[in-house]
Amino acid sequence: MENSFEKISEIFKSVFGKHVSINSDTKYEDIDEWDSLSHLSLIVELEEKFELGLTPEEIENLKSVKAIMQVLKSRHRNT
């Protein structure tokens, strides 16, 4: 999981554009392009890159980089 933030950053750039720069405190309100449609694209990319299936509850709660990192960390610990 060491490079998971790097992967997440690349996913954000792929979904929201090269100009997007994130940190662990980035929330959906911070990115103008983060709407319901791009949220679905983000989820698909996360599931593909990290080879996991997210639950509906997780998808609903993934509204920040911190939340994404927490889910990835908990999934990694459980495998």
Image (cartoon, rainbow, N blue to C red):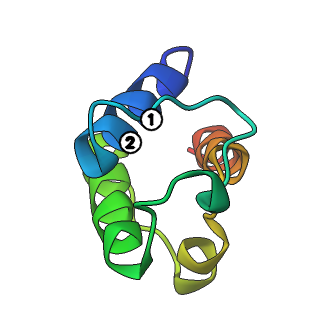
Q: Quarter-wise, where is residue 60 in the image?
A: bottom right
Q: Which mark is residue 37?
A: none
Give the answer, above or below, for where 8 lies relative to 5: below
Q: Quarter-wise, where is residue 12 in the image?
A: top left
**Count of marks overlaid on the render:** 2
Q: Residues within 10 Å of mark 2 (few under 14, many from 20)?
A: many
Q: Residues within 10 Å of mark 1 (few under 14, many from 20)?
A: many
Q: Which mark is residue 8?
A: 1
Residue 5 horizontal/vertical position (percent):
53, 26
Q: Which residue is mark 2?
A: 12
* Residue in the picture at 28% in, 53% down: 45
Q: Of helix, strand and loop, which one carries label 1?
A: helix
* Residue in the picture at 49% in, 28% down: 21
Quadrant including the N terminus: top right
Observer-nearest residue: 12 or 68?
A: 12
* Residue in the picture at 75% in, 39% down: 25
Cα distance between the residues tagged 1 and 2: 6 Å
Residue 66 horizontal/vertical position (percent):
72, 44
Give the answer, above or below, for where 5 lies relative to 14: above
The amino acid at mark 1 is Ile
Residue 75 horizontal/vertical position (percent):
60, 49
Mark 2 and mark 1 in contact (Cβ < 8 Å)?
yes
Give the answer, above or below, for where 7 lies relative to 72: above
* Residue in the picture at 60% in, 60% down: 28
Residue 3 horizontal/vertical position (percent):
48, 16
Q: Left or right of 73: which side holds 10?
A: left
The amino acid at mark 2 is Phe
Quadrant including the C terminus: top right
